[in-house]
Image (cartoon, grey):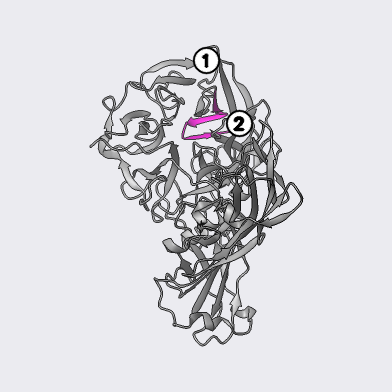
Amino acid sequence: MRWVSVGMMFVVGCSGSSAPPPAAPMGKPAIAGLKSIAVQPPNQRLVIDGASPATQAYSAIGTFSDGTTRDVTDQVQFQVEDATLGAFANASFTSNLDHGGLTNVVAVAGDALATTGLTLVMRQRIDDPSSTVPADAAQKFTGAGDPTRAPDVVYPNDGVLVPPNLGRLEVHFQPGAGNTLFEIGFQNTISDILVYARCGTPLNGGCVYLPDASVWKWLSATNRGSGAVNIVVRGTDDSGTSVGASQPIAVSIANDEIAGGLYYWTTSNGTGIMRYDFASPTETAATRFVGPELTGGKCVGCHALSRDGSKMVAEAGGQNSGQLLMLDVASSKPMVPFPAVARSTFESWSPAGDQFVGVYGDSGATNFNLMIFDGGSGSMIAPIAGTGTAQNPADHPDWSPDGKKIAYVKVGMSNTLQRMSKGAIELVTQTGGSWSAPVELVPALAGKNRYYPAFAPDSSFLVFDESTCANGASGDDCDADTDPTARLFAALPSASALPVLLARANAPGRLDPNASLTNSFPKWSPFVFQRTGEAGSRLMWVTFSSSRRFGLRDAPAGTGDEGTSGSLIWMAAIDPDQVAAGQDPSFPAFALPFQDFTTSNHIAQWTTQIVPPIQ
């Protein structure tokens, strides 16, 4: 059986090819002679107004096989498809109070079913709890429009897409002339949320508003998987003399909550590997996981984690070292005494976590190929022949999530593997237990350096970095070591792939002085998510390091060879179906809110979960 839609009415049909509607309803017994049902009133738009729920009484009109119609309200079961939005008591609907959204009202009797649309608008007026505003703050915004007072929203970037469990999406704005009181609005067809606030966190001449938990719930739960919400900031003085309004900034909320764990390297405050659990309902800040205390004081930087999050391999000591820390994540203890016997600079794990691929081409190197290592002991199993030489060593390996491919860099001008030039992206494929000869995906290009390939979670394409050598072929502006000119590209894993620029993800913020943003170290969340509420929509998340400004915030100070500006971890949504079409698949990036904004952060490695510590 399946339900066949006829306008707003559903009747019974026979087919084995279609699934029933969402949240298959539990109806009342069949009504003799009933042919179809119509729900009245149709397609309602109701408003949840503050603490007052939306309510609506419905009725059901039945059409019978003899052509007659009559009210069958008491003989049908009413329910709402999205039970998080509210519930029925007999034929009367009452909404919940924490979010709105789009759904259907369903009426069922036996095999007869009918639906009609329901739009629940979330209307809220709230004073920001971190501010002290007049009791009649809303009335101050009824004055005449005044463009000279217009605030300017400088973060997030227009068109950004964020996960619903991001939690802490700051709004940065410049206040406009003479304004002391602000209205931050989040509005579309299902949201009407206005927050009244002061410039409570002044920063570099502007203001930072952070939605509290209730506002974020109203916003994210109402709009997940739906259309964009427009953020508009209006400003006035305490007398309400006149009102200026910013240009709208569109923000969309993805359908699925993001999951998994993130481990990244901070180069400041003693250095170390930090981690954050996206699945945690309470965690708001990254915590330090491991640092030089396990390596005799040697810096722990470049690191890789097994997909399941149980193992970490990290290089300690920097360039010309290659000393490996093999770590059991649950116990936070070395799996073998540090350093492991073999040496490597950059690593990537097989999907099963039993092996990893590494490279070493620095002082004392004897094998410049990709090398497969045992995931328990760190001992080398075998090199992959033909992938590197002393003049052109292999670098930056990434093992595809399907286990069949390894992408890597063929170094064109060697120095150390941390600082190499004239890179090309190559690929080997595993067939019948052996690895193929290398295939060139993205060739070396004069005046460019291509490096850091990273496979998307379904292995269908990869992203990589490209730097421009303005100061010569081997200048430090394009040696793959936090290059200012680094930009992200995508490419299919096939010979002579055509690179696609991730223009929106690469783009600067409103207050960035130039486009040299050090967009580097791309890494993927391990899952494929749903972007909208429609079946078939797909979404992936990529993280990268960037020295761009975080709205009103300056980039953190650089350390070591980073120059004056350090980097933060940024994230961007990717529509994978655009890559094959040769179109920019990216959305504007946003700063991950749980990191320390005063430190320089790099190499955000993902796992499917945070393995809990052994008690």
Residue at the image position 54 percent from the left and 51 percent from the top = 82
Q: Residue at x 28, y 29 (%)?
A: 334
**Structural distance between the alpha carbons of marks 2 and 1:** 25 Å
Residue 473 percent across, percent down from the top left: 59, 37
- The percent position of residue 76, horizontal first and vertical second, equals 58, 52
Sequence-first tag of 2 and 1: 1
Q: Is residue 461 visible?
A: yes
* Location of mark 2 (residue): 460
The reply to whether dot 2 and dot 1 touch (C-beta < 8 Å) is: no
The answer to whether residue 301 is left or right of residue 435 is: left
Q: Residues within 10 Å of mark 2 (few under 14, many from 20)?
A: some
Q: Secondary structure at mark 1?
A: loop
Write the start and end of the magenta stretch as one range. Answer: 405-422
**Helix, strand or loop for disc 2:** loop
Q: Is 544 on the left-hand or right-hand side of 426?
A: left
Residue 187 showing in the rendered view: no
Along the viewing direction, whichever of 248 and 549 lies nearer the viewer: 248
The kind of residue tagged 2 is: Ser
Q: Is residue 466 above or below residue 77?
A: above
Pick the residue in front: 505 or 269. Answer: 505
The residue pinned by badge 1 equals: 385
> Which residue is depicted at the point 53% across and 21% down?
388
Queried whether the magenta region covers residue 116, the answer comes back as: no
- Counting from the top left corner in percent of width and height, residue 453 is at 55, 33
Amino acid carrying mark 1 in the image: Ala
| Residue visible at 56% across and 32% down in the picture | 458
Could you classify mark 1 by the number of other residues whose Cα lies within 10 Å: few (under 14), some (14-19), or many (20 or more)? some
Taken as a whole, is the magenta stretch helix, strand or loop?
strand
